[in-house]
Amino acid sequence: MKTLLENEFISILFDEEKSILLSRWKPASEMMESGQMLELLQKFADLARQHRPACFLANDSMSKYMYTIQEQALVAQQILGALLGAGVKKFALILPEDFFVEMATEQTLEEAGEIPFQQMTLRSEEDALKWFAQ
């Protein structure tokens, strides 16, 4: 996998051969401010549109950033728009280990409403990669 973006909060990688875009949030995301999160969200959207992956894996297991209620609709809209614009067919999510962050992430997904591609919540990147291969 090729690293597209790497900082203290997130890694975004792309496997061109398998057409998989992967984001991995880091524990330091707990220190991230809303403006930084929104900036990273825009960078993600740009990378998704540029690389046009068939599959997107959001590994949020180490995420410590809790979306505010105000951010949830914006995040859902921005990510969904980027994935639709990129032509994603499958979306896999690994939920955060932190219970409260998990709840905020699930509420953000609910804000997205009907998602017009296959979606699965899984426990590991390995499980997601197997599902993508099906």
Image: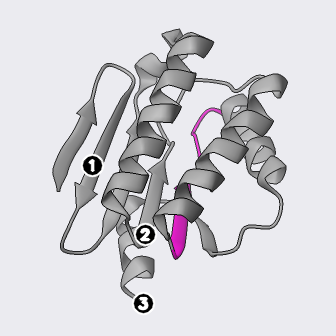
Question: What's the distance in space between the residues labelled 1 and 3, CA to CA?
Answer: 21 Å
Taking the spot 74% from the left edge, 27% from the top edge, the residue there is 71
Task: For mark 3, give the secondary structure.
Answer: loop
Name above or below for residue 33 compared with residue 14: above
Residue denoted by label 2 = 55
Q: Is residue 7 magenta?
A: no
Residue denoted by label 1 = 13
Which amino acid, mark 1? Leu
Question: What's the distance in space between the residues labelled 1 and 2, CA to CA?
Answer: 12 Å
Q: Is residue 94 magenta?
A: yes
Tell me, for residue 134, which label it has, or none: 3
Q: Is residue 127 visible?
A: yes
Please give left or right for residue 119 compared with residue 108 in the image.
Answer: left
Taking the spot 52% from the left edge, 73% from the top edge, the residue there is 90
Please give left or right for residue 65 compared with residue 42 in the image.
Answer: right
Q: Earlier in the sequence, mark 1 or mark 3?
A: 1
Classify residue 130 by image quadrant.
bottom left
Question: What's the distance in space between the residues labelled 2 and 3, CA to CA?
Answer: 12 Å
Classify residue 134 by image quadrant.
bottom left
Please give left or right for residue 119 compared with residue 132 in the image.
Answer: right
Which amino acid, mark 2? Cys
Q: Earlier in the sequence, mark 2 or mark 3?
A: 2
Of labels 1 and 3, the one closer to you: 1
Stretch in magenta? 89-98
